[in-house]
């Protein structure tokens, strides 16, 4: 059994912790670019009768 599973984590949780730790350990000139990768965006598409319902696209926060 792997140590992250023995600690009660799944692989996604372990991977997220490792990535966050690495980003925090970077030098400041590289940290800003790496932290941008930590952001994630999702889009939820409602479905009705087996087909997606068209909705307006979300506005950009940038």
Image: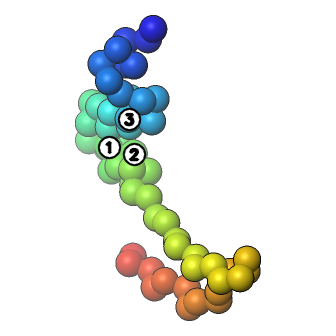
- Mark 3–mark 2 Cα distance, whole angstroms, equals 18 Å
Q: Which residue is found at the position 46% from the left and 64% from the top? A: 41
Number of residues whose C-alpha sits closer than 10 Å to that of mark 1, classed few (under 14), some (14–19) or many (20 or more):
some
Ranked by sequence position, the earlier of labels 3 and 2 is 3
Residue at label 2? 34
Q: Which residue is found at the position 71% from the left and 82% from the top? A: 49
Compare residues 1 and 12 and report the one nearer the observer.
1
Q: Is residue 22 left or right of residue 49?
A: left
Number of residues whose C-alpha sits closer than 10 Å to that of mark 2, classed few (under 14), some (14–19) or many (20 or more):
some
Quarter of the picture holding the C terminus = bottom left
- Residue 26 makes an appearance in the image: no
Q: Residue 28 occupies which quadrant of the picture?
A: top left
Residue 54 locus on image (x, y percent): 65, 89
Determine the secondary structure under disc 3: helix
Residue at label 3? 13
Compare residues 3 and 27 and report the one nearer the observer.
3
Residue 10 locus on image (x, y percent): 42, 30
Q: Please identify the residue farthest to the right as the structure is shown.
A: 50
Determine the secondary structure under disc 2: helix
- Mark 3–mark 1 Cα distance, whole angstroms, equals 21 Å
Q: Is residue 8 left or right of residue 12?
A: left
Residue at label 1? 31
Ranked by sequence position, the earlier of labels 3 and 1 is 3
């Amino acid at each position: 059994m792997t140590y992250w599973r023995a600690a009660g984590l799944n692989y996604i949780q372990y991977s997220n912790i490792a990535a966050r730790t690495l980003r925090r350990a970077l030098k400041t000139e590289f940290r800003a670019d790496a932290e941008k990768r930590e952001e994630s965006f999702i889009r939820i598409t409602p479905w009705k009768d087996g087909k997606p319902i068209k909705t307006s696209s979300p506005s950009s926060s940038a």
